[in-house]
């Protein structure tokens, strides 16, 4: 269904004020989520020199995808991506940003 895809993207401006609050809320949630993702990435870039494996203390690790973390925000419950890394020496996976 074509209409539902537009709704998911949250960019279709509603026809009336009756729908405006829901629309604005969805827009706000989406931008809030993007802002959290940007924060997460820039924080990761900032601390990556100092990341060491909590199990063996190795500094040799690789990015190993993302998990999601549920956050209870002022805009309700949101899922934000959480960077996961894997230690090249002992294989331990961990989340350097907690
Ligand atoms: Zn390790």
Image (spheres, rainbow, N blue to C red):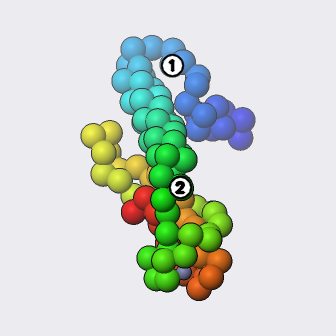
- How far across and how far down the image is residue 87, in percent? 59, 76
Q: Nearer the viewer, residue 60 or 11?
A: 60
List the residue tagged with mark 2.
48
Crowdedness near tag 2: few (<14), some (14–19) or many (≥20) residues, C-alpha within 10 Å: few
Tell me, yes or no, whether the two marked residues, 2 and 1, touch with CB atoms within 8 Å.
no
Residue ranking furthest to the bottom: 90
Q: Taking the image as four quarters, which one is ligand 1 found in?
A: bottom right
Q: Which residue in the structure is indicated by mark 1?
A: 14
Between residue 66 and residue 91, name the one nearer to us: 91
In this rendering, does residue 9 appear at all? yes
Snapshot quadrant of residue 3? top right
Q: Is mark 1 within 8 Å of ligand 1?
A: no
- To which quarter of the image does residue 23 belong? top left
Q: Residue at x 49, y 46 (%)?
A: 46
Q: Is residue 78 left or right of residue 93?
A: left
Distance between the alpha carbons at the discs numbered 2 and 1: 43 Å
Above or below, 36 relative to 68 = above
Q: Is residue 50 left or right of residue 76?
A: right
Residue for point 36% across, 24% down = 21
Of the 4 image quadrants, the one containing the C terminus is bottom left
Nearer to me, 24 or 55: 55
């Amino acid at each position: 269904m074509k209409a539902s895809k537009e709704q998911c993207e949250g960019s279709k401006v509603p026809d009336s004020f009756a729908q405006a609050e829901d629309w604005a809320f969805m827009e706000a949630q989406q931008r809030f989520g993007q802002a959290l993702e940007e924060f997460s990435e820039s924080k990761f870039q900032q601390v990556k020199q100092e990341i060491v494996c909590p199990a063996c203390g190795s500094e040799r690790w690789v990015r190993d995808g993302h998990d999601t973390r549920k956050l209870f925000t002022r805009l309700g419950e949101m899922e934000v991506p959480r960077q996961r890394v894997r230690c090249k020496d002992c294989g331990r996976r961990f989340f350097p940003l907690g």
